[in-house]
């Protein structure tokens, strides 16, 4: 028993030290979704009749019906974004509740889909990981839609993340303190990636759930989208 407990205690102590040794970041900005878009998403979720010809370009983009950067342009402002040159090799997760809640749903530019962790309980310790090629433009900002933001009911019913431990190349890098809001939260994370891209190796960012805001109805914890912004584009 002692031979089992000692490594376990060392692992717990190491994890606590890693958390205490990284900076804690607060959102630099929170951008709220207009209620009109949430109402459209709510009608879609409940399969109500919708006159799609009446939707704005932004509403189409928010619902994932187009594959361009109109959602990102809305959040970043007009002009070029990191996604003009940004590349992501893969999005993976430690678990998912079902295929329709897989990791890649947290980066499909739609607010009616999401990554939902798949373990019993509230998902503390579960993670989602983004892999980038060495040639990828550097990242300076992480933007997160916390919880299941497709409509107000499911947002309240499901858990949201309170704290994320962010890893850069599998090393603890920062703790992101997320607010319990349906808005898009923007974090300044320094500069991640490589300036000299000719021989740069692949790199990664991982987000581990440390603490949650509990849902009113379900234990599942949800992240709808994680976007990035940065430099080296144009």
Image (spheres, rainbow, N blue to C red):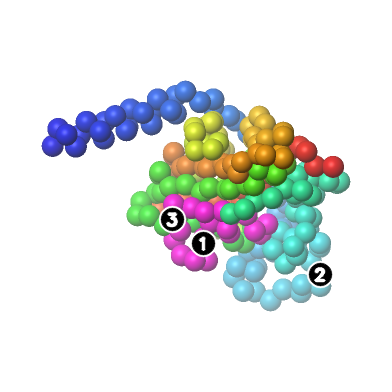
Residues tagged 1 and 2 counted as in contact (Cβ below 8 A): no
Q: Which residue is mark 3?
A: 95
Which residue is disc 1 drawn over? 101
Q: Is residue 33 above or below residue 154?
A: above
Q: Give how far apart the Cα atoms at labels 3 and 2 are.
A: 38 Å
Q: In which quarter of the view is residue 148 placed?
A: bottom right
Find the distance from the CA under tag 1 to the CA under tag 3.
10 Å
**What label sits on residue 54 in the rendered view?**
2
Question: Which quadrant, please, contains the C terminus?
Answer: top right
Quarter of the view holding residue 197: top right
Quarter residue 152 falls in:
bottom right
Task: Point out the tag, 1 or 2, that comes first from the N-terminus.
Answer: 2
Residue range corresponding to the magenta coloring: 91-110
Looking at the image, tell me whether mark 1 or mark 3 is earlier in sequence order: 3
Identify which residue is drawn at 16% across, 34% down.
3
- Residue in front for this viewpoint, 85 or 27: 85
């Amino acid at each position: 028993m002692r031979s089992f407990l000692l490594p376990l205690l060392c692992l717990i102590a190491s994890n606590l030290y890693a958390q205490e040794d990284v900076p804690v970041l607060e959102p630099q900005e929170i951008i709220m979704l207009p209620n009109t878009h949430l109402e459209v998403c709510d009608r879609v979720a409940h399969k109500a009749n919708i006159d799609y010809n009446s939707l704005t370009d932004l509403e189409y983009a928010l619902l994932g019906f187009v594959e361009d950067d109109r959602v990102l342009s809305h959040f970043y402002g007009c002009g070029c974004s990191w996604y003009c040159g940004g590349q992501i090799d893969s999005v993976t997760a430690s678990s998912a509740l079902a295929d329709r809640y897989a990791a890649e749903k947290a980066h499909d530019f739609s607010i009616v889909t999401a990554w939902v962790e798949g373990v019993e309980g509230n998902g503390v310790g579960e993670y989602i990981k983004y892999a980038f090629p060495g040639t990828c433009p550097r990242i300076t900002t992480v933007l997160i839609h916390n919880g299941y933001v497709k409509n107000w009911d499911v947002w309240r019913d499901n858990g949201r993340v309170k704290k994320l431990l962010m890893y850069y190349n599998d090393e603890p890098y920062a703790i992101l303190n997320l607010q319990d809001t349906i808005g898009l939260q923007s974090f300044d994370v320094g500069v991640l990636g490589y300036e000299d891209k000719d021989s740069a190796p692949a790199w990664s960012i991982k987000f581990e759930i440390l603490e949650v805001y509990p849902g009113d109805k379900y234990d599942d914890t949800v992240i709808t989208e994680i976007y990035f912004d940065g430099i080296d584009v144009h």
